[in-house]
Image (spheres, grey):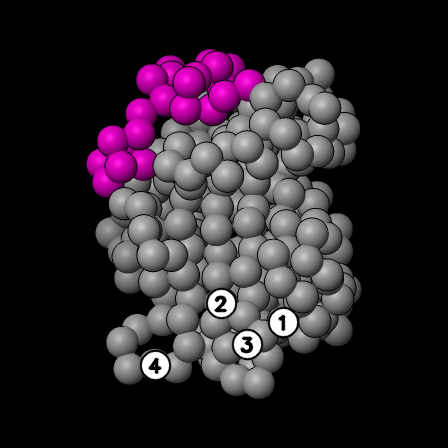
Amino acid sequence: MKAPGPLSDESVKPGEPGRFHDDQFLWMRFEVMKKFIYESPAAEIARRLSRANEVRLFYDHLIVKEPGTKITTAWHNDHSYWPVRGNQVISVWLALDYVPKSSCVQYVKGSHRWELIHKLTTFAGDTERFKGSSTTNLPPPPDINSMLDKVELLSWDLEPGDCLVHHSFTVHGAPGISPTANRRRAYATRWVGDGVRYEPRPGTMESLWRTVANLDPKLSPGSPMDSELFPLVPSQ
């Protein structure tokens, strides 16, 4: 957080309490992150659960909520934001702090089967950033708060080093952090299996990667995810 990259973002506006920080592609800048990618069990976890023969790192993602952050993480799925097609798309969400259930990410059980591609919002639920893009014709993210009698939410108490694994179509969100709670740092690694194809739909993150961070996978639509930007990581 002291050396944010070009893709870092702050979801809490100046003058509002707390801090909601996230950053991407840290493995390209920090050796400790790169070591985790190649030496931790994360790749093997993703390979087994996605039933892939091999997996590539899609990107890594640091997500930090400080105590007193009132902003909730808006309900969304990851697939809507990503230039991918296929079902072997997995996130390994690693807790770096103790996370009580009251602060933990919440998953909508079974929502990966909806295979929803929805309108894009920021973490804080703001749609203005995407106003005017072709994604405005997509359905909105599901209003889970109005469906609580129809869905089951899953969340857990986590110790540092515990991880949660979710499919890219799984709808999820997260509450704010109480002023008396500890900070919630999470390091998420995103993985794609050999059956996934590159699909740069309008509004997906690849355009941000190229224009803001000069990160271009140099792939054609429909091609395998065989790019230096998405390195193949041998399973442990």
Mark 2–mark 3 CB contact (< 8 Å): yes
Name the one closer to the observer, 25 or 123: 25
Q: Amino acid at mark 4?
A: Glu
Write down the region rendered in magenta: 209-232
Q: CA distance from mark 4 to mark 1?
A: 19 Å
Q: Amino acid at mark 3?
A: Ile
Q: Which residue is the site of mark 2?
A: 65
Q: Earlier in the sequence, mark 2 or mark 3?
A: 2
Q: Residues within 10 Å of mark 1 (few under 14, many from 20)?
A: many
Dot 3 lies on which element?
loop
Q: CA distance from mark 2 to mark 1?
A: 9 Å
Dot 1 lies on which element?
loop
Q: Is residue 49 above or below residue 228?
A: below
Mark 3–mark 4 CB contact (< 8 Å): no
Mark 2–mark 1 CB contact (< 8 Å): yes
Percent across and percent down for residue 163 are 70, 50
Q: Residue at x 40, y 50 (%)?
A: 23
Q: Amino acid at mark 2?
A: Lys
Percent across and percent down for residue 100 are 70, 71
In this rendering, position of residue 2 left or right of residue 184: left
The residue positioned farthest toward the front in the image shown: 31
Q: Which mark is residue 16?
A: 4
Q: Residues within 10 Å of mark 2 (few under 14, many from 20)?
A: many
Q: Residues within 10 Å of mark 3 (few under 14, many from 20)?
A: many
Q: Which residue is the site of mark 3?
A: 177
Q: Residue at x 57, y 85 (%)?
A: 180
Evaluate whether residue 132 shows in this view: yes
Mark 1–mark 3 CB contact (< 8 Å): yes
In this rendering, position of residue 42 left or right of residue 198: right
Q: Which residue is the site of mark 1?
A: 103
**Image quarter of residue 177:** bottom right
